[in-house]
Image: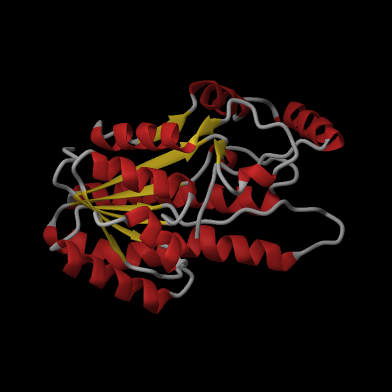
Amino acid sequence: MEISGARIWVTGASTGIGAALARELADRGARVAISARNAEQLAEVAGSRMVVVPVDVTDRAATVAAGERVREALGGLDVAVLNAGTWSSFHVEPWDSQLFADHLQVNVMGAVHTMEAVVPQMLAAGRGRVVGVASVAGYRGLPGSEAYNAGKAALINLLEGLRGSLAPRGVVVQIVNPGFVTTRLTDRNLFPMPFKVEADVAARAIADGIARDKAEVVFPVPMMVAMKLARLLPVRVWTRLTAELARRGVHGGPSCRAG
């Protein structure tokens, strides 16, 4: 697709990948609207060249209303980038079910609410594009990130199913699965993060993937290869490997999210 002139809404755009992507898309000539919870941070990202629509994507009604405000401000919508999310490590003791609920509410239901805000209008128009930002962490379970990984696996599965459902109606679905990206969330991680890239590098990779109509955008390449190969390992082998990772305190952490 042609990014220049496209009307694009990016959620989770106050920091990290979302902020970098919004800037990259604006640099390429897109008309960009950005959303997250923090209006002040959004204003800093936007400057004078983006539309700012603060919203908490866990609030269904507010997110649907935000979608309408975005369409009004941009004169329509061509692309929705579902990037809002959260990350916290998980420990089996003490068990914290609320941590799972919080991750699923943001990382899965936040995307679902944003889809509700844009997909019906795209179907009515017979055109549009949904870009869901998940993570390579959703490919296979890793210790210490059970809540995050479960949500990202669910999001990948959801987007894959919707791709088939929406394609005949003219709506394109793309999935973005980053590896580790330098952000405020990964800055607090104390475990090794192999092949970590800067947010602006991630933003260019995503923008290039959108422009090239790639069904799945995965980066960096070494992490893509490692995690795709991991899905081919037998269960017993993967269990031994992840048990050793847990013993060493290595986690399958986030790419980066911003709410």
Location of residue 207 in the rendering, given as x and y in whole percent from the top left corner: 31, 37
Residue at position x 54%, y 45% in the image: 256
Q: Looking at the image, is 220 positioned above or below residue 129?
A: above
User: Looking at the rendering, which quadrant does residue 17 occupy?
Assistant: top left
Residue at position x 57%, y 56% in the image: 86
**Colour setting:** secondary structure
Q: Nearer the viewer, residue 110 or 187?
A: 187
Give the left or right position of residue 121, taking residue 131 as reference. left
Give the left or right position of residue 141, taking residue 17 as reference. right
Residue at position x 46%, y 70% in the image: 56
Q: Looking at the image, is 71 positioned above or below residue 184?
A: below
User: Looking at the rendering, which quadrant does residue 67 occupy?
Assistant: bottom left
User: Looking at the rendering, which quadrant does residue 242 occupy?
Assistant: top right
Q: Looking at the image, is 31 positioned above or below residue 66?
A: above
Location of residue 225 in the rendering, given as x and y in whole percent from the top left corner: 54, 22
Location of residue 94 in the rendering, given as x and y in whole percent from the top left corner: 86, 61
Q: Nearer the viewer, residue 87 or 116?
A: 87
Location of residue 20 in the rendering, given as x and y in whole percent from the top left corner: 40, 43
